[in-house]
Amino acid sequence: MNAVSKIVTMLVSLGAGALATKLVDRTWKGFTGNDAPRGKDAQAEATMRQAISFAVFSAAVAAVIQVIADRGANKALSKLTKK
């Protein structure tokens, strides 16, 4: 992997991570009416059911976003390396 591909992959991953965080937070608030249980204080106040639900939901979104980010990075790299 050359330097350009590493940079492109990193930028796509960072953007995808930021997007995923916003998506999870807004969707969680939309369904539950509460803020996402992030941080020690929020996690301590959340019920076990809420904590597990949030963990499962955020992991599922992260997996989907990772696949999309990987495909996007590969597509961008193929366009950059075309001659």
Image (spheres, helix red, strand yellow):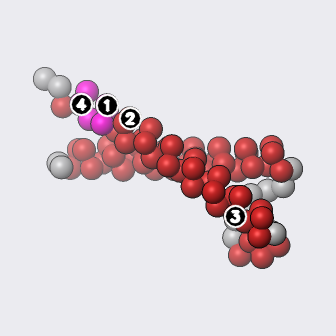
**Residue 75 badge:** 1
Residue 83 shown left or right of residue 62 in the figure: left
Does the residue at mark 1 contact the one at mark 2 (Cβ under 8 Å)? yes
Under mark 1, the amino acid is Lys
Does the residue at mark 4 contact the one at mark 1 (Cβ under 8 Å)? yes
Under mark 3, the amino acid is Ile
Residue on which disc 3 sits: 52
Of discs 4 and 3, which sits in the foreground?
Answer: 3
Q: Residue reaching furthest left?
A: 83
Lower sequence index among marks 4 and 3: 3
Residue 42 visible in rendering:
no
What is the C-alpha distance between the residues marked 3 and 1?
35 Å
Does the residue at mark 3 contact the one at mark 2 (Cβ under 8 Å)? no
**Residue 78 badge:** 4
Q: Is mark 1 on a helix, strand or loop?
A: helix
Residue 22 shown left or right of residue 31 in the figure: left
Instruction: Give the percent coordinates (x, y) of residue 79.
Output: 25, 27
Residue 36 visible in rendering:
yes
Q: Residue reaching furthest top?
A: 83
Of discs 3 and 2, which sits in the foreground?
Answer: 3
Q: How crowded is mark 4: few (under 14 residues within 10 Å), some or many (20 or more)?
A: few
The residue nearer to you, when weighing 59 against 12, is 59
Instruction: Give the percent coordinates (x, y) of residue 26.
Output: 73, 45
What is the C-alpha distance between the residues marked 4 and 3?
39 Å
Of discs 3 and 1, which sits in the foreground?
Answer: 3
Residue on which disc 2 sits: 72
Q: What element carries label 4?
A: helix
Magenta span of residues: 74-79
Instruction: Give the percent coordinates (x, y) of residue 70.
Output: 37, 42
